[in-house]
Image (cartoon, rainbow, N blue to C red):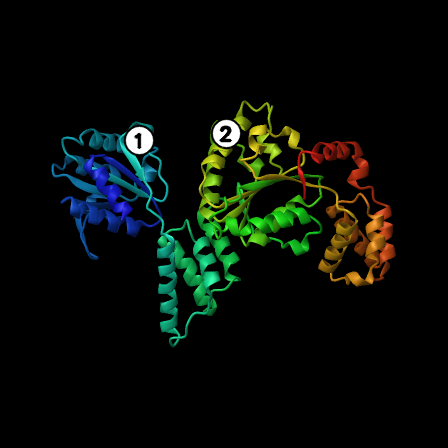
């Protein structure tokens, strides 16, 4: 087991302070007790409730002194011991920032390590040592379960449910199980078990309908709300008018991304450039829907923090979350707002760009990037060159056929029968309209029909369309310039 080997190595090379960040305290305690036994050392645990106790295999803990609940007293006691031991400190993290006596005692124990080789193990869900003692420490993260262990947990929970329900078998299929194992990667054993149990015990089945719920629960466990959001509503390309070139491109690469064809390189990501309201955001959601993946949306604006270095740290934490949620689609909406060149922000944009490029170059996780932009001229070339992203697609205003599809989709969403409307006439009248402008024309026409107490019809829709000036008219020069730039530089979506 890799965790045991690493901890044995830390003791062999005599590192005085070890930091383990985990929610699985019991697993860490059991592991440390085995390591201590192998090295022939006593193992002690300190907590605010129990004080300092000696650990042994089994449920019993041997109290040393009820007066050692206070961290300063416990550390002073450890410092006075002449027999080397392993001391696991479970609740010390709140005292390391505002109690200099506690920090000084830890430092004394570390400095005396070669005379009396005590090992202090700081065990917490999150912990950062003060700089004056951090240099004597090493951090270790407990390994996460591999695919085989996740499948084993699923079988254990299925067997337990079956025994409780008259040996009735849990209903599932191999494809769903494969997706489930993939989606549960990046979680601890206890979290995997809890999510699997919640899915099975609900109805005795593991189906495709359970996967979105489990992905949402996984995202909540990883705790990155604010900077990153979990998009529960993905789309299918049946709900997207046009974009046939993008659909074909994605269909051709779906199996390679899922690892079903090992001869092909895994696709990395795409940039969607286009007119505002043209359907870039809808397309990003449809990528996740087509590939059956969770969709994460990175809020570029929420990354920025006035304190030096915090913005980059926020981005690193967000990308770490995306890796943990793998396989997934990472959507960066209006990417030019956070990584544009020439920004006068004291170099923050450049540092953010550097952090992002490093992650793109080094990542091994199955995270597919979908970046959207309204103005590619502000983006640095090192971000959009081939090799970083696979392709740049231009999402233009919909053509006549696509406009008919868009009318049909949005009328159907609002419980109107598309066949009762003259879609060809509506598509002709809406020339120059974006998808979102067509949708808003339908919304406005429904209000007008309700006010007149009549059913929505083609004439009412035509009235709303003719009274609207689309963006292609209001900002004709800008859109013409964007189209001209994209004509020979991008692929039509």
> Percent position (x, y) of residue 419?
80, 62
The quarter of the picture where residue 155 lies is bottom left
> Percent position (x, y) of residue 320?
45, 41
**Residue under pointer 1:** 134
Mark 1: give few (<14), some (14-19) or many (20+) Cα within 10 Å. Answer: some
Which residue is pictured at 58% across the width and 33% down the height? Answer: 384
> Percent position (x, y) of residue 482?
72, 33
Q: Is residue 387 found left or right of 146 in the rendered image?
A: right
Relative vertical location of residue 175 with respect to residue 18 in this rendering, above or below: below
Between 92 and 163, the one lying in front of the other is: 163
> Percent position (x, y) of residue 326?
47, 48
Between 119 and 333, the one lying in front of the other is: 333
Q: Is residue 101 found left or right of 421 in the rendered image?
A: left
Which residue is pictured at 71% across the width and 43% down the height? Answer: 277
Relative vertical location of residue 90 with respect to residue 210 in this rendering, above or below: above
Can see residue 291?
Answer: yes
Q: Tally the marks.
A: 2
Q: Is residue 106 found left or right of 289 in the rendered image?
A: left
Can see residue 73?
Answer: no
Which residue is pictured at 58% across the width and 50% down the height? Answer: 252
Quarter of the picture holding the C terminus? top right
Of marks 1 and 2, which one's residue comes earlier in the chain?
1
Q: Secondary structure at mark 1?
A: helix
Number of the label disc, if any, that sits on residue 354:
2
The quarter of the picture where residue 475 lies is top right
């Amino acid at each position: 087991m890799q965790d045991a080997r690493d901890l044995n190595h830390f003791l062999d090379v005599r590192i005085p302070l070890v930091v383990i960040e985990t929610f699985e305290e019991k697993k860490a305690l059991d592991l440390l007790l085995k390591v201590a036994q192998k090295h022939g050392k006593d193992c002690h645990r300190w907590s605010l409730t129990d004080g300092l106790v000696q650990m042994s295999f089994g449920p019993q803990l041997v109290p040393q002194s009820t007066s050692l609940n206070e961290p300063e007293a416990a550390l002073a006691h450890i410092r006075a011991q002449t027999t080397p031991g392993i001391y696991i400190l479970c609740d010390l993290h709140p005292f390391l920032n505002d109690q200099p006596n506690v920090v000084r005692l830890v430092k004394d124990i570390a400095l005396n390590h070669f005379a009396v080789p005590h090992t202090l193990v700081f065990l917490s869900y999150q912990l950062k040592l003060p700089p004056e003692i951090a240099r004597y420490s090493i951090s270790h993260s407990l390994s996460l379960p591999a695919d085989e262990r996740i499948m084993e947990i699923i079988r254990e929970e299925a067997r337990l449910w079956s025994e409780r329900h008259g040996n009735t078998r849990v209903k599932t299929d191999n494809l769903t199980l494969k997706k489930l194992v993939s989606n549960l990667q990046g979680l601890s054993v206890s979290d995997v078990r809890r999510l699997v149990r919640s899915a099975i015990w609900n109805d005795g089945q593991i189906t495709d309908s359970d996967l979105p719920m489990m992905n949402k629960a996984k995202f909540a466990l990883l705790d990155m709300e604010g900077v990153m959001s979990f998009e529960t509503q993905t789309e299918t390309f049946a709900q997207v008018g046009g974009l046939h070139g993008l659909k074909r491109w994605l269909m051709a690469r779906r199996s390679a991304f899922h690892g079903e064809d090992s001869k092909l390189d895994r696709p990395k990501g795409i940039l969607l450039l286009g007119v505002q309201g043209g359907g870039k955001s809808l397309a990003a959601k449809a990528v996740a829907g087509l590939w059956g993946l969770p969709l994460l949306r990175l809020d570029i604006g929420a990354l920025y923090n006035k304190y030096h270095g915090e913005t980059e740290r926020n981005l690193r934490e967000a990308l770490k979350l995306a890796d943990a949620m793998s396989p997934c689609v990472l959507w960066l909406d209006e990417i030019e707002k956070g990584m544009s060149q020439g920004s006068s922000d004291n170099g923050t944009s450049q540092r953010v760009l550097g952090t992002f490029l490093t992650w793109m170059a080094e990542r091994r996780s199955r995270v597919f990037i979908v970046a959207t932009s309204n103005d590619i001229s502000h983006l640095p070339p090192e971000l959009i060159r081939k090799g970083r992203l696979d392709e740049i697609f231009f999402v233009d205003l919909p053509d006549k056929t696509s406009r008919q599809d868009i009318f049909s989709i949005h009328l159907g969403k609002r419980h109107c029968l598309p066949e009762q409307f003259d879609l060809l006439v509506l598509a002709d009248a809406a020339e120059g309209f974006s998808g979102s402008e067509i949708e808003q024309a339908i919304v406005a026409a429904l209000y007008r029909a309700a006010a007149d107490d009549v059913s929505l019809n083609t004439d009412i829709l035509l009235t709303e369309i003719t009274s609207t000036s689309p963006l292609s008219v209001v900002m004709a020069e800008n859109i013409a310039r964007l189209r001209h730039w994209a004509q020979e530089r991008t692929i039509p979506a």
